[in-house]
Amino acid sequence: GIQVEQSPPDLILQEGANSTLRCNFSDSVNNLQWFHQNPWGQLINLFYIPSGTKQNGRLSATTVATERYSLLYISSSQTTDSGVYFCAVATMFSGGYNKLIFGAGTRLAVHP
Amino acid sequence: GAVVSQHPSWVICKSGTSVKIECRSLDFQATTMFWYRQFPKQSLMLMATSNEGSKATYEQGVEKDKFLINHASLTLSTLTVTSAHPEDSSFYICSARTAISNQPQHFGDGTRLSIL
């Protein structure tokens, strides 16, 4: 099956710093989503981005489907950005059900 | 829009009890729903895929007799953990999508299950 690798696994930032999280995947995808899981376990959908670039406030994401990677940019980080960031992908070979396979996540801690 | 409601949020029960978790799409028709399991400090692992009106498809290693999934309508799927034991304690999350292609999956808030 498809492999999803996220880097870095852990990241510590000072409030106000910028960061880039990376997601590499091993096969063609027809769905890619970035999530933020908060300390209560809620998965917040950040971006649906199988290709191209999107921005939402201090966050932006770029997926280069032909090179099989996606990047999540966090600018001017805040303590509320702390948590785990997951990349999840689905391939056209998942039986047509668009099953999402999750990466291991990047654990982000933003200190004041 | 695209809200998925999952209940209950927390369950604590005795070993041997069966526990039912509900996943509802509140404002869209979910032709396909998914169930995930997450252990502490780990990623989400897909357990099964369910399509409305048909049997669920389970991932390798997931016991279908232990984790019963029903998707009887376009807005409701249920996961029943039968005869639960402490090793079944985990965080269970559902998601849902429509039949329209090029649309994201929408996730519930999860259910924290603790078996004593």
Image (cartoon, coloured by chain):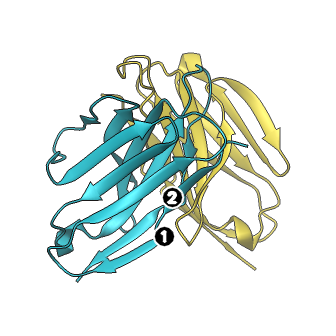
Chain colours: A yellow, B cyan
Above/below status of A3 relative to A51: below
Residue A52 lies, in percent from the top left, at 71, 24
Q: Do callouts 1 and 2 mark residues in contact (Cβ within 8 Å)?
A: yes
Q: Residue at x 53, y 43 (%)?
A: A87
Residue on which disc 1 sits: B9
**Image quadrant in which the C terminus of chain A is located:** bottom right
Chain under numbered label 1: B
Give the alpha-carbon distance from disc 1 to disc 2, as whole Å. 7 Å
Residue A34 lies, in percent from the top left, at 60, 43
Q: Is residue A52 left or right of residue A4?
A: right
Residue on which disc 2 sits: B6
Q: Nearer the viewer, residue B84 or B72?
A: B72
Examine the image and state in which quarter residue A27 appears. top left
The residue type indicated by label 2 comes to: Gln
Q: Is residue A76 left or right of residue B42?
A: right
- How many marks the image carries: the answer is 2
Q: Residues within 10 Å of mark 2 (few under 14, many from 20)?
A: many
Q: Secondary structure at mark 1?
A: loop
Q: Nearer the viewer, residue B13 or A62?
A: B13
Residue B18 lies, in percent from the top left, at 22, 66
Instruction: State whether residue B39 appears in this view.
Output: no
